[in-house]
Amino acid sequence: MDKKTIRKKIIAERDEMDFDVKQAKDELIVNKFLELGFIDKYDNIFSYVNFGSEIDVGKILSTILEKGKNLFVPYVDVKSKQMYLCQITDLSTDLEKGHYGILEPKKNLRKPVNSDIIDCVISPGVAFTTKKDRTGYGGGYYDRFYSSLKQRPFIVALAYDFQILESLPTESFDVPVDMIITEKKIIK
């Protein structure tokens, strides 16, 4: 299967999940992430803000802020196809709907950030492998972002078990993750 077909199949399966089942799986995945102590270990954490049927990271984001760590979230420039970071300090007031309907930092908060300070990334993705390959939504935003960094941060992906495939078509610019946490396992 090509990437486009894989994306369509996995997103459809994710979208069709029963609400209660999704909520239970999200809680298991989020709690595993929190128990692994990443928030205590890292100071500058970059995370996606979930939308659609992605795993709900709200509890992780609020825990990062409660522990006094620096939380960065993305916004995109669709024309240049670049993703930028913005530090936020309040989940209820600092975000607004942006491109694709995804919550992004409000425009007045966006200031240039030295992305090289990021030491941990909570990465979104559509499909993964046990070798930690990652396929995103097809825009290449995260791969370009990772390639632009001088130092590679620790990249952890949150996924449902059905998002882990035997193999994925990969290209030279695809950046693998360092760990994947699902409701059933942790892939290191």
Image (tube, rainbow, N blue to C red):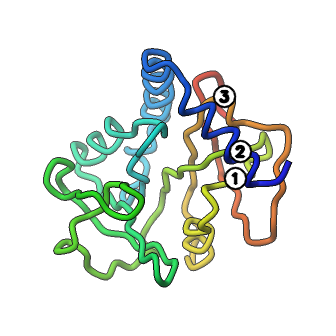
Mark 2 to mark 3 CA distance (whole Å): 10 Å
Relative side of 16 to 174, left or right: left
- In the depicted view, which residue is nearer to us: 98 or 30? 98
Q: Position of residue 150 (x, y in %)?
A: 57, 79
| Residue found at x 76% / y 54% | 3
- In the depicted view, which residue is nearer to us: 176 or 97? 97
Which is nearer the N-term, disc 2 or disc 3?
2
Residue type at the position of mark 1:
Arg
Residue type at the position of mark 3:
Asp
When asked about the image quadrant of residue 154, the answer is bottom right
Mark 2 to mark 1 CA distance (whole Å): 5 Å
Tag 2–tag 1 contact (CB < 8 Å): yes
Task: Please name the residue that numbered disc 1 is placed on.
Answer: 134
Q: Position of residue 46 (x, y in %)?
A: 42, 58
Q: Position of residue 112 (x, y in %)?
A: 31, 82
Task: Please name the residue that numbered disc 3 is placed on.
Answer: 161
